[in-house]
Amino acid sequence: MTAIVVFLFILGGIGSVVGAAYTGLFGPKARARRRLAQGRVHQIVEGEVVTLVGTVEPLGELLEAPLSGTACVAYAVHVDLHEEPAKGARRRTVVESIRVERIVPFRVVTASGIVEITAPSIDSSIPLVPLVPHDRRREQAFLRAQDRSPDLSLAGPFVEYAVAPGTQLRVQGVAVLDAPDMTVERDYRSPAPSRIHLVAHPDHPLTIGLP
């Protein structure tokens, strides 16, 4: 291996590390984490951005996360597709990245009231992680559903997050207040909790994350 080749190999490795560090500090999930961390709720005001923490409850039919099979209200899956490596190559080149996200309406039961999430899309700081052990059949089915070859030797790693009912979740958005929710069980002396819709902020999507 010539000195130039070695230099280029080292330079490529440095570039990958720098790119990963930049994404970790300034990428979409990092921005979502910072937004959620800045939220403080003292009083919920109509039309103001609020951040609340509570327990996820479904409002209707659940989704099934593709890789884990988890019944959930939201999920995301990411996988990189690689080209056929050259003989003797140490690294595989990514030719395409697939990211699939889905969400259905759900609510979050918080100390401040019932928060309903009906947005068509969200921004999430929840990390996507590989499943251990992973299910090869589900991975192949996911690739087929995206009209891709199920050849797992050219795909990976597969990572996923799924928000199941009962999950403790932090949510942030613009508060839209509705009438109190009379369907929630409570002591007769306790007032009915407020029902709150959270919608996207003009500057960023509705955001969710772990507490």
Image (spheres, rainbow, N blue to C red):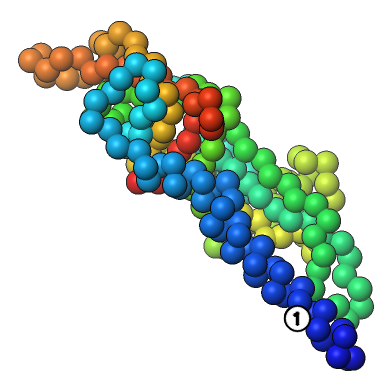
- The x, y position of residue 81, in whole percent, is 79, 56
- The x, y position of residue 98, in whole percent, is 73, 47
**In percent of the image, x 56 and y 53: which residue is there?**
26
> Is 31 situated left or right of 14 in this image?
left
Residue most extreme to the left: 189
Q: Quadrant of the N terminus?
A: bottom right
> Is 77 situated left or right of 2 in this image?
left
Question: In terms of image quadrants, where is residue 3?
Answer: bottom right
- What residue is shown with label 1? 10
Closest to the observer, 211 or 63: 211
- Residue 197's place in the image compared with 4, above or below, is above
Which kind of residue does numbered mark 1 sit on? Ile
Question: In terms of image quadrants, where is residue 44?
Answer: top left
- The x, y position of residue 57, in whole percent, is 38, 30
Residue 139 in sight in this render:
yes
Residue 128 in sight in this render:
no
> Is 186 situated left or right of 28 in this image?
left
Q: Secondary structure at mark 1?
A: helix
Residue most extreme to the top: 179
Closest to the observer, 39 or 74: 39
